[in-house]
Amino acid sequence: MTGVVALGPPGTMEAMASLVDRHRDFRVLRRMPAMRRNGGRGVRPGMLAGCAIDVETTGLHVASDGIIELALQRFWADSDGRIVTTGRSHQWLEDPGRPISPEITRLTGIGDLDVAGRSIMDPIAASLIADADFVVAHNASFDRPFVEKRLPLTAGRPWVCTLSDVDWKANGFEGRTLGYLLMQMGMFYDAHRASTDVTALLHLLDHPLPAGGTVLKAAVEAAARPAWIIDAVDAPFEAKDLLKQRGYRWNAQARHWSKEVSGAAFDDEYEWVVLQVYGGTGRPRFRSVTWCERHSAGI
């Protein structure tokens, strides 16, 4: 029959894919499977309990926009950062009380009819987050403010961000978007929905790194280290390019440049700001930050 390709059983297809994957001119991507694991002996003392989370929203601004989809899934990992057990995947749509823009519908596939009359089950969502040792998202600076605005009882939990808490370049990866990282791991997925992104995040967390351990282990260790935020308050306007090159980010709400540094790097960074930005005539502000505050709306 013209135009029809006969596909063999799954075992045959996998053998074919493995054969092609061994050729230097080809690389095979496999469809991302669901993340379902049962560790046999169940949850044991010493395991880390995490909550992977993702949101879809009506826009980018937490003050004026809201969540239209919340997805989360609990998991437990061993001391090496390998995910041993996963809980049930949860996903809720929510009516934002106003029309969803066509741009957001094109991006997420979520329209007004999908969310009409729907709402997040607050007690379940809040308890799953509160009972975890930490919450993890791929862009926690975006997700955390929306989650804590919608579920204020979850405020103050430790958060981990796989976007910023992992040195992807040092670990042999290019780029940092979730879909691109999964492709470099040999997987692909279709829909841009919160529930699918949570599954992708779990696979990302479980991925082994060249230096040992997993993405989860590296991210948790980085996030748990106390650090300092240096605020270059009232910095001269002509210093903006210098600050940007140094890794400072403009805080539009507070109207100053800020940068987070580790405890070991604080003294050198503070001295650099005093001399290079203020010319020795001014001082920046600084404050300590832990993973309980990092990525929240006020940080």
Image: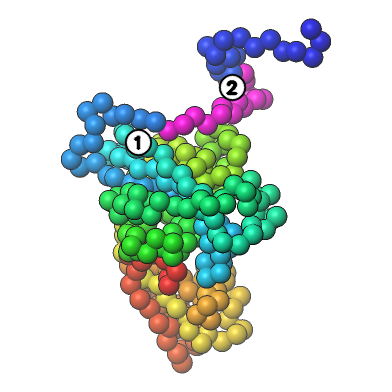
Quadrant of residue 28 in the image?
Answer: top right
Q: Name the residue carrying label 2.
A: 21
Q: Examine the rendering and report whether any part of residue 263 can be seen.
A: yes
Overall secondary structure of the magenta section: loop
Residue 268, placed above or below residue 183: below
Give the extent of the magenta segment: 20-35
Spot occupied by residue 287 in the image (x, y as percentages of width and height): 35, 76
Q: In the rendered view of the protein, which quadrant contains the N terminus?
A: top right
Is 152 part of what is drawn in magenta?
no
Q: Name the residue carrying label 1.
A: 86
Is 23 part of what is drawn in magenta?
yes
Circle 2 residues within 10 Å: few <14, some 14–19, many ≥20:
some
In the picture, measured across the screen, residue 228 lies left or right of residue 190, that is left
Q: Residue at x 59, y 47 (%)?
A: 114
Query: Which residue reaches farthest front?
Result: 117
Q: Residue at x 38, y 54 (%)?
A: 122
Q: Secondary structure at mark 2?
A: helix
Q: Secondary structure at mark 1?
A: strand
Instruction: Name the image colouring.
Output: rainbow
Spot occupied by residue 94 in the image (x, y as percentages of width and height): 51, 53
Seen from the viewer's position, the closer of residues 132 and 78 is 132
Mark 1 or 2 closer to N-term? Answer: 2
Circle 1: residue type: Thr
Circle 2: residue type: Asp
Query: Which residue reaches farthest left?
Result: 45
